[in-house]
Image (cartoon, rainbow, N blue to C red):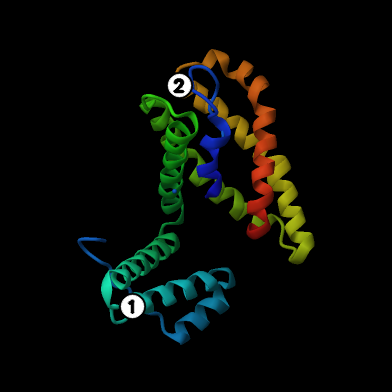
C-alpha cells in the first residue's frame, strides 16, 4: 500500500493545471476472542501463508483484552492494539474492500501532503484530491491486491531467485503499465482527455524512474 501514498508524490509535482500529477473505536471498542493454539495449528497447516497473519491477530487480540495499563499512554496503546486486531480481521474477511479503503486513505493523505507541504498551494484543489482518492479506492487498492496475489502464484520459487524474479516482473512489467494507466485516468477524470498522449510522452518515463528509485527501498522488505 505504500505505492498508494507515493503516487501523488510521484505524479503531482505542481498544480494539476500546469503539470500532470503523478507521483490507505473510540465510542465502541471491539473485543476479539483470542484464537486457541489448536486453531492456529490447524490454520497454519491448511493455509501456511495466512498463519503469520492469524498469529498477529491472536497476539493483538490477547493484548487488547488484557488489563489496561495505568495512565493515558496505556489506554492509547490498548486502543491501537484493538484497532490492529480489527484491521487484521477485516483483511482476512474482506481483503479487497479493506485494501481499497486503505489505499484511498493513503492516496488522500499523499495528495494533501503534496499540495500543502511540497507545493504549498494557497488553496486546496479539491477536485484533484477527489480524483486521487477515487483512483486509490477503485483502481490502486484492488489492482495491487490482484496483482501481488497473482505474482505469488506465478513465481513460486523461494529464496533470492524467487525474490529477484518477482522484483523484475513487478518493476519492469507491471509498474510501467500501471503508472501509464493511472496517469491516463487521472488526466481524463480532470476533464482533459485530449492531452493524455502528450502528458504520457512528457511525464511517463520520468515517473517510472522515480517509481524504481522508491521501489528499491520498499521491495527489500516486500520480497
Residue 92 is left or right of residue 44, and the answer is left
Question: As rendered, which of 69 and 204 lies closer to the eye?
Answer: 69
Please report the residue visible at 58 percent of the width from the left and 31 percent of the height from the top. Answer: 181
Q: Residue 190 carries which label?
A: 2
Q: Quadrant of residue 158?
A: bottom right
Residue 70 is left or right of residue 199, and the answer is left
**Farthest residue toward the right?**
161
- Quarter in which the C terminus is drawn: bottom right
Q: Quadrant of residue 62?
A: bottom left
3D distance between C-alphas at marks 1 and 2? 47 Å
Question: Can residue 223 be seen in this snapshot?
Answer: no
Query: Where does residue 152 sit, x and y in percent of width and height?
Result: 65, 58
Query: Where does residue 218 sit, x and y in percent of width and height?
Result: 63, 52
* Residue 186 against residue 68 in the figure, above or below: above
* Residue 108 against residue 71 in the figure, above or below: above
Q: How many marks?
A: 2
Q: Which mark is residue 55?
A: none
Residue indicated by mark 1: 33
Residue 63 is left or right of residue 14, and the answer is left
Amino acid at each position: 500500500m505504500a505505492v498508494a501514498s507515493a503516487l501523488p508524490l510521484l505524479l503531482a509535482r505542481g498544480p494539476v493545471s500546469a503539470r500532470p500529477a503523478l507521483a490507505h473505536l473510540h465510542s465502541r471498542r471491539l473485543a476479539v476472542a483470542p484464537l486457541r493454539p489448536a486453531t492456529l495449528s490447524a490454520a497454519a497447516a491448511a493455509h501456511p501463508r495466512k498463519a503469520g497473519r492469524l498469529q498477529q491477530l491472536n497476539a493483538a487480540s490477547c493484548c487488547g483484552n488484557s488489563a489496561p495499563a495505568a495512565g493515558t499512554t496505556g489506554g492509547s496503546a490498548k486502543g491501537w492494539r484493538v484497532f490492529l486486531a480489527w484491521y487484521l480481521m477485516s483483511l482476512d474477511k474482506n481483503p479487497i474492500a479493506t485494501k481499497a479503503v486503505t489505499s484511498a486513505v493513503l492516496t488522500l493523505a499523499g495528495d494533501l501532503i503534496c499540495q500543502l507541504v511540497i507545493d504549498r498551494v494557497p488553496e486546496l484543489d479539491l477536485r484533484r484530491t477527489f480524483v486521487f482518492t477515487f483512483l486509490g479506492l477503485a483502481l490502486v487498492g484492488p489492482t495491487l491486491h490482484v496483482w501481488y496475489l497473482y505474482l505469488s502464484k506465478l513465481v513460486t520459487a523461494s529464496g533470492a531467485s524467487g525474490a529477484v524474479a518477482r522484483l523484475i516482473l513487478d518493476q519492469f512489467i507491471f509498474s510501467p503499465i500501471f503508472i501509464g494507466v493511472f496517469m491516463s485516468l487521472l488526466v481524463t477524470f480532470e476533464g482533459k482527455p485530449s492531452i493524455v498522449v502528450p502528458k504520457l510522452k512528457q511525464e511517463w518515463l520520468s515517473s517510472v524512474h522515480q517509481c524504481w528509485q522508491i521501489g528499491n527501498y520498499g521491495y527489500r522488505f516486500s520480497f
